[in-house]
Image (tube, helix red, strand yellow):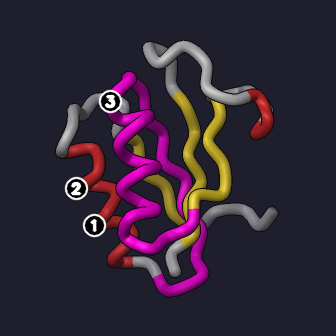
Amino acid sequence: MDRPDYYIDITGDTCPLTFVKTKLLLEKMPPGALATVRLKGAQPLDNVPRSVRAHGHDVISLAPEGGSAGAGLGDPRLPHILVVRRT
C-alpha cells in the first residue's frame, strides 16, 4: 500500500465534528490520494468509515493504532488508524 500523503487527528473531537473534519480533508485532496485519520471512540469508529463510504470514497483499512490492518477493531477508547482513498 502507498504511504498516505494526508493526515488528520480527530481523537479529541466528537460526532458529528469527526466526520465534518474528515470530509473537509477529503475535499482538499486530489482523486486517488490517501489519507490517514486517527480517531477513537465508539461513535467515530462506526460513523466515520460508514460516512466515508456513503460519500463514495474507499476505506482501505481500519485498525488499532500500532496493530495490523487485519486485527479488526480493538478497544474504542484507544486510538485507531483509518486509511481512506479519495475517489
* Residue situated in front as seen by the camera: 84 or 66: 84
Q: Amino acid at mark 3?
A: Gln
Q: Where is residue 71 shown, x and y percent of the image?
A: 76, 28
Look at the numbered disc 3 and give the secondary structure of its residue: helix
**In terms of sequence position, does the residue under pointer 2 or pointer 3 come before the other?**
2
Q: Amino acid at mark 1?
A: Leu
Quadrant of the image for the N terminus? Answer: bottom right
Estimate the spatial distance between the alpha carbons at disc 3 and disc 1, rounded to whole Å: 19 Å
**Residue 33 vs residue 11: left or right?**
right
Residue matched to label 1 = 24
**In terms of sequence position, does the residue under pointer 3 or pointer 1 come before the other?**
1
Estimate the spatial distance between the alpha carbons at disc 2 and disc 1, rounded to whole Å: 6 Å
- Which span of residues is magenta-colored? 30-58
Q: Residues within 10 Å of mark 3 (few under 14, many from 20)?
A: some
Is mark 2 in CB contact (under 8 Å) with mark 1? Answer: yes
Q: Is residue 5 magenta?
A: no
Q: Residue at x 21, y 37 (%)?
A: 15
Quarter of the view holding residue 54: bottom left
